[in-house]
Amino acid sequence: MRGPLYLGWCYLRRHPAKTATLVASIAIVLFLPVGLNVLVGEVSGRLMARAEATPLLVGARASALELVLSSLYFDAAEPEATRWSQLLRVRESELAEPIPLYVRFRVRDQPVVGTTLDYLDFRGLRVAEGRPFAVLGEALLGAAAARRLEVGVGDAVISSPESVFDLAGVYPLKMQVVGVLAPSHGPDDDAVFVDVKTAWVIAGLGHGHQDLARPEAQAAVLRRDGRHVTANASVVQYNQITADNIDSFHFHGEPEALPLTAVIAVPRDEKAGVLLRGRYESPDEPVQIARPREVMRELLATVAAIESWVLAAIGAVAVATLATAALVFSLSMRLRRREVRTLTMIGASRASVFVLLASEVIFVAIFAAGVAGALTLAVRRYAAAAIQAWLLG
């Protein structure tokens, strides 16, 4: 760097506070519209990709958005429960293959997803260590969940109670970790996958306890009536499923009435999907069938409408900021009149003087563009995932 440009660079170094203020102001003006557009595009792309990969969701007739967010991202509020009979209904229609979901509990901050091995195939999830869950009480962890819980194959995780004041007698369940999934860069990385029956055990709908026919359990027997045995509150219930006690675990009530939060329905083809949706159109139907792609499009349309208003506000702020920057540059030129006169007297050409004065604007613009570009890259890499988590949390 030589001549007028070098002198201009020295001038900016001589006034670091003014230079930093101008660079920061212009960088923010350049970054906000571009960064917001990148952010919305990244979040929209991530949300739509998972929604488009999920054909249909069957759930309780309530909020379709709540059903989709809970079933696809595991972070929204728990939707109203439906029943296992709805899964049987989809299966008996022979129009789609059903996959159950029961998303209600957590291991610390990680969601517990009760489902079947069909879910792993549906999402294309691959086991990196160990094996998939096979029996009651086994857990398969997403890559991020294993890292955050600091556990691996052979360790155990314990479900978190829904409330400190849990008077229903639902005890935390200790589950054996049998595998860890490879990173999928999506919500599945944060989940703890278990068989849906294991999730029902966590909910207290199934349990195992000591054999009341054994002599050592006689103190827990309240009365016997033929083949029926009534136990008192002292009966020992197991909070871990092992090879020794797994046979004692059982469920109460009709299997068709056991709860699910959703059923993923994977139609054979497009025509089968239309026929299946038609069976849930009646206003008296107690459940709904949602198309995640349409639900997410409605949500993102609302976000786009808000974005347009935000961009308009940013435009007004940008005009005011650039006008202020122009005023600062204009005042700077006035203050440098003596400097210009001195340069002219020692033989500097008018072109050199012009380059010297313009270099202040040029350098500030280059630095501001660099800062705005760096911020945009940071948004593309990190902020989209954070904003997505916040929207769904």
Image (cartoon, rainbow, N blue to C red):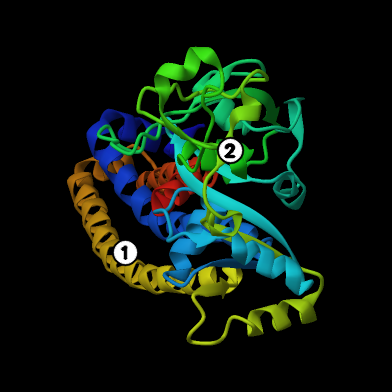
Specify the farthest residue to the top: 216
Residue pictured at 69% horizontal, 46% vertical: 116
Specify the farthest residue to the bottom: 282
Where 309 falls versus 66 (above or below)? below
Helix, strand or loop at mark 2 = strand
- Which is nearer the eye, 175 or 334? 175
Helix, strand or loop at mark 1 = helix
- Which is nearer the eye, 292 or 91? 91
Which residue does the numbered mark 2 point to in the structure image? Answer: 250
Mark 2 crowd level (few <14, some 14–19, many ≥20, 10 Å Cα): few
Where 217 falls versus 182 (above or below)? above
Quadrant of residue 281 in the image? Answer: bottom right
Which residue does the numbered mark 1 point to in the structure image? Answer: 314
State which mark lies toward you, 2 or 1: 2
Reading the chain from its start, which is encountered first: label 2 or label 1?
Answer: 2
How far across and how far down the image is residue 129, in percent? Answer: 74, 23
Q: Amino acid at mark 1?
A: Ile
Residue pictured at 77% horizontal, 78% vertical: 272
Residue pictured at 53% horizontal, 74% vertical: 288
Please tell me the numbered disc located at residue 241: none
